[in-house]
Amino acid sequence: MLSLKPCLAATAIAVGVLGTSNGIQAQNLKGAVSIDGSSTVYPITEAVAEEFRSEAPNVRVTVGISGTGGGFKRFVIGETDISDASRPIKDKEFNAAIENGIEFVEIPVSYDGLSIVINKENTWAKDITVEEIRKIYLEKHAAKTWKDVRADWPDVEIKAFGAGTDSGTYDYFHEVLGKKESIRPDMSTSEDDNVLVTGVAGNKGAIGFFGCAYYFENIDKLGVLAVVNDEGKAVKPAATTVEDG
């Protein structure tokens, strides 16, 4: 598991904060709340939105998944009320919000661990080093087969999946591999992690990365690689390993 920064932030509530109390006040609320952004934060936001709808049925709450960057693009021009993010807001996004008169607060809501997932039929790979991940995902290496990554792995073609460039997960993954390096252009990408789950589950030689919640929800469909840390320990995603970093 690659540790992820504590930046699963439902980043910002524009202009005002919508709050409710139990009973008559919530029942009388009307209007709409628009939310968009990170697919990593989506499960949390959708659960909260569902609970809110039960208390305030006359308020229309929509939750989208366009990735952290995609969500901020809408948020800084006032199209959404809440922007889900799996990274802090960037300077250019912050400045755009200020220029457009969008006042906001950042609210950290969770911690996450970046998971390296594989197809269930992959019985040879149990752990992987960061350098081996670089061999697979960086354009200058772009390993064609698993044997190219580790000599005792089979000559099975690699199919790489990963978060889209509008995703905060992509930004963090790129940071881990080296910001100045280029990611392989043939990687299949999506801002929707469910699409990545389907892709990895459907190809024997597949490897992918996304937040651990989507791995936990799909343990029956996916395998996972333990990532070797600086101390030489191979770490898998779990609640305990996320909590202790």
Image: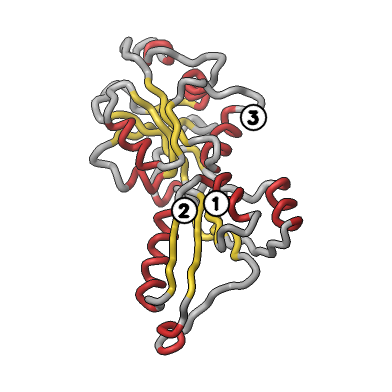
Structural distance between the alpha carbons of marks 3 and 1: 19 Å
Q: Is residue 83 left or right of residue 207?
A: right
Q: Secondary structure at mark 3?
A: loop
What is the quadrant of residue 49 in the picture? bottom left
Callout 3 touching callout 2 (CB < 8 Å): no
Q: Find disc 3 in the rendering and name its residue.
A: 179
Q: Is residue 99 above or below residue 189?
A: below
> Circle 3: is it few (<14), some (14-19), or many (20+) Cα within 10 Å?
few
> Circle 1: is it few (<14), some (14-19), or many (20+) Cα within 10 Å?
many
Residue plotted at (40% across, 31% down): 208
Q: Is residue 22 left or right of residue 199?
A: right
Callout 2 touching callout 1 (CB < 8 Å): yes
Circle 3 or circle 1, nearest the eye? 1
Q: Find disc 1 in the rendering and name its residue.
A: 85
Instruction: Compare residues 64 and 198 and report the one nearer the observer.
Output: 64
Instruction: Compare residues 58 and 121 and report the one nearer the observer.
Output: 58
Kindly identify the amino acid type of the residue bearing the numbered disc 1.
Ala
Structural distance between the alpha carbons of marks 3 and 2: 23 Å
Between discs 3 and 1, the one toward the N terminus: 1
Give the number of the disc on residue 43.
none
**Residue 189 coordinates in the image, percent (x, y):** 45, 32
**Residue 113 coordinates in the image, percent (x, y):** 46, 44
